[in-house]
Image (cartoon, rainbow, N blue to C red):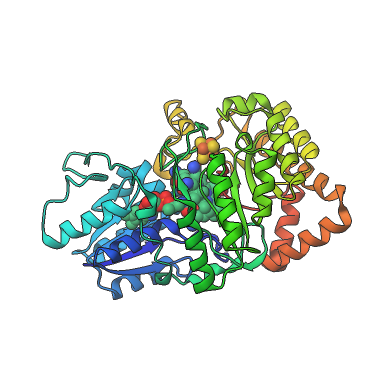
Amino acid sequence: MRVCLVYPSYGSGRRSRYFPFGLAYVAASLRDAGHEVFVVDMEGNDLDPDRAVEAVCSLRPDMVGFGGMVTRFRFVREMGRELRKRLPGAFLIAGNSGATTIPGIYIESCGLDAVVIGEGEKTSCELASALESGAEWRHIPGLAFPDGVGIGRSPAREPVGDLDTIPWPAWDLFPVERYVNSFDHRQKLVRHLEVVASRGCPFDCVYCYRIYGRRVRRRSPASIVAEVEELVRRFDIRYTGFPDDLFTSDRGFVMEFCRLFRERLPGLGWSCLGRVNTVDAEMLSEMRNAGCDWISYGIESGSDAMLRAMHRGVTAEQCLNAILMTRKAGIHPDGSFMIGMYGETAETVKETVVFCRKADLTAPMLFVTPYPGTAIFDRAVSEGRIPSVEDLVSRMNAADDLLVNLTDLPDGELVALRNRAQRRIGLGYLARRPFTRIPRMLYRRFLLRGWKGVARDFLGLMGISGGRRGCRKRA
Ligand code: B12
Ligand code: SF4
């Protein structure tokens, strides 16, 4: 069967940095199962929806599969509707976190035949094979589909038990050089490509959607290191990283991985996401020795009241200790913050500003946004704060804008608080070491986004508009 997978644009027009692993895993499994797989990568190839639709049509696919998180919904809708008209015989599906959490909206608004819920490797292969042979497909686990009266669902798909058995991502089907030769998340221009080492997270943060569930499944250190070696061999990467929900959750795994990585890939740098209550001094030192130079922690707030409201399961003191311990180990700690949780006040925001000063951190402050599939989304819907889910998800981007106000503060006041806090955090950080930090910041911004970007970030820092964008979810 001819399958065309579409990676919808990031929507910002800027240079891609993050390789679409989910789609590449699905592509690899479909190819292994004997299907002819094509990819239309809007982001990697700078395609607008019109050109992407042309590209898909020219491939004459039997099945089209959209990827991309919920922030790409509007592109899936635009292209899905057009492809429905232009390719009436093709079977249209979507997967990933957006489609998984609001399958009905994806199916009805985008003109899809089905949505793949959760992990896509096995479900998409079984679906493609059933469609090819003309067999009934609605019983295949992990699907949602129109059933005449509404949205029907097949039984849930069991998560893949042994991640080592999944074929590595089909990098070659994507314009991989575009991702490899780009700025990494440290905003350094270095040849890099990341590797997914585990799936799942046992914690319960109320703003987070965990597509892989609570049970953590890890690949073996040998398989992860072998994949990195392959990336070095094929793409000459000089840096790697692990975008997993919780890379640091198992001490034994991290220690074993570090030992192997140091032995087989000496000198190669890497980064990961961490959680403050899963690291200790010895582990950090081992990670540093193995090449780790950057850990991104989800701090989210410097207020214990807000951390409790988020169900983070950690205190501000634990966050501070982890940041200081990480820095002491020679690893750069990065933190992400957000504002606008239920109960947020000027006082709690101030605590976050003070926290950043103590921790010597700077970070964009994004607005708490109720993404589908999260506890705060369900609560906001039940409270009537989200009159139209489709309208909300069509406007989602990178949480730079206030989309749903969950606090008791008026919108204008919350935005002003955010801008003031961001300015204080940013200026405070620069002022602590102005001669090194200001030139470095301007240089990186210039490399990344040119003069316009420098101006935009400057305005962001002054609190006049939003600043840097990034992924809210940091373990
Ligand atoms: C790396 C990452 C990013 C990267 C970009 C990733 C990318 N290439 O698009 C960056 C840093 C840019 C980013 C940004 C944001 N991110 Co982010 N990100 C992640 C992270 C940590 C890993 C993604 C990943 O590679 N996973 C590994 C792959 C293998 O898994 P996967 O993509 O889910 O794919 C599987 C299935 O979904 C499915 N599948 C996927 N595509 C398809 C397609 C088809 C056809 C089929 C059949 C199946 C299928 O099969 C795959 C294999 O099993 C996830 C958390 C997570 N654990 O997934 C959050 C996550 C996806 N991000 C999230 C969010 C909220 C954001 C931001 C909005 C944050 C913010 N406030 O700014 C921004 C949005 C930016 C934008 N404008 O789009 C949420 C999405 C929530 C939702 N309901 O959609 C997640 C789930 C985090 C969370 N736990 O809440 N992010
Ligand atoms: S934010 Fe991180 S620690 Fe919290 S539930 Fe999500 S992945 Fe887990």
Q: Is residue 73 visible?
A: no
Quadrant for residue 55, please give it.
bottom left
Q: Residue furthest right?
A: 435
Query: Which of the 4 image quarters holds residue 347?
Result: top right
Query: Where's residue 187, x and y in %?
Result: 67, 60
Q: Nearer the viewer, residue 198 or 334?
A: 198
Please tell me whether residue 230 is drawn above or below residue 22 in the rendered image.
Answer: below
Image quadrant in which you'd find residue 348: top right
Q: Residue 242, position in %: x, y?
A: 54, 53
Point out residue 130 in the picture as x, y percentages from the top left corner. 16, 56
Where residue 222 appears, as percent x and y from the top left, is 48, 56
The C terminus is located in which quarter? top right
The answer to whether 290 appears left or right of 247 in the picture is: right
Q: Residue at x 60, y 36 (%)?
A: 278
* Picture mark count: 0
Q: Is residue 287 above or below residue 368?
A: below
| In front of the other: 172 or 75 | 172
For residue 319, above or below residue 258 = above
Image quadrant where one finds the N terminus: bottom left
Residue that appears at 55% across and 51% down? 257
